[in-house]
Amino acid sequence: MASVEWSGDLDAKDTPDASLTPAQLATLELIRLPNEERVTHPSTLRAQIELELEKETVDLVDLLEEPLWVSKRQLHAVNSCEALYEAQEEEPFEWRVPMTRGQIFHKCVELSIHLSPKRTASELVDEALKSIMNRGDGLAKFLLGLSDVERAEIRSEVASLLQTFFDTFPPLKRGWQPTTETPRKVSLHRGMIVLQGRFDVTVGRPEELTAGRVIIELKTGRSVPHHLDDLRFYALLETLVVGVPPALLASFYVDAGRVQVETVDEDLIRAAIRRTTQSIQRLIELRLGQTQAERRPSGACKWCPVAGSCGPGQSWLEETETRGAW
Ligand code: SF4
């Protein structure tokens, strides 16, 4: 198998591996940004962004008694239905079978990159399940509590998904410097606000001040608009930790074998700073009880735990039902 070095150029001298499927080739072309399109950023960018984030939140942070942890989940929640967010914060977290699929899948991808010799999809699922069930955490206990049939069904679903991934995503070569489950954490106001995330997969790396890393999120569900915002937040985290923004952001939808990409530029970073600061302000106001949680009906009303007592949610559900009659 001919090797493909991680270079942005896709010209004749860098002909991709002929053994790749059309879907793998299409993905590869989309997640490689030509060198001449890569942006070189100022060395002061990291300090500027940190200063801006702290300046925009300084008035509220002194009122906090406990640190505020902010991940893509909190940012999405506060930008959709705030009342649902508050209800979920009060509910104890519980694992459910559909949630395990993504967790095991991500573990399989991680092992597929780092385990040698290469394993088949089913072997990887077995390795991943064994590793997770030995961890002793909440997911391990949940999986151990399932019946053999339930575990076999999960194994079968994840193995199919993984095979689709292998057929549609180019094999990650060592020369691309791939990483999996990369944590990023940024502490503001001496730890009173902590921004955090974990990137599913990255390939490439920056060269001095020139962007080169691609952050890839692997999605086992359908495409929704907030996936873009999640990745833009990750671009911000990457910039605050490394000092250079990523070159590209990509969401890979495993079921469909398709990737959606976005190039990172100054406007994108500015939009991420704006959304993050506005959301932090809102999260603090909600925590301090300085504001009422807004109710914003959407498809989430169908499974919302407080839908029974929510007027706007009930109206939305009735309207949807009426429309659905036709
Ligand atoms: S029912 Fe809908 S609008 Fe009401 S709290 Fe739940 S998600 Fe929000």
Image: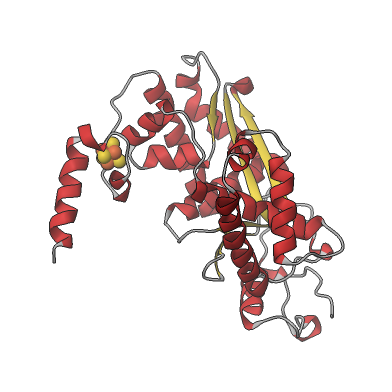
Give residue 250's position: percent from left, percent from top: 58, 61
Tell me the residue at 39%/18% (across/down).
Answer: 288
Residue 158 visible? The answer is yes
Image side of residue 83 versus residue 101, left or right: left
* Residue 211 visible, this orientation: no
Q: In this view, does 47 lie above or below 231?
A: above
Compared with residue 196, is residue 90 higher up or lower down, i.e. above or below? Answer: above
In the figure, 8 relative to 74: above or below? below
**314 displayed left or right of 36:** left
Query: x, y (%) of residue 209?
Result: 74, 52
User: In which of the image's four quarters is ligand 1 placed?
Assistant: top left
| Residue 169: quarter of image | bottom right
**Total of numbered circles in the picture?**
0
Which of the two residues, 150 or 129, is positioned nearer the viewer here?
150
- Image coordinates of residue 104 in percent, x first then y, are 63, 51
Quarter of the N terminus within the rendering: bottom right
Left/right of residue 11 with respect to residue 292 in the rendered view: right
Task: Please tell me which residue is depicted at 18% across the width and 61% down the height of the picture.
Answer: 324
Residue, x 63% and y 83% (percent of image)? 22
Residue 174 in percent (x, y) is at: 83, 63
Q: In which quarter of the image is the C terminus?
A: bottom left
Q: Is residue 66 left or right of residue 48?
A: left
Residue 115 is drawn in which quadrant?
bottom right
Residue at the outermost right position: 117
Tell me how the rendering is colored: secondary structure
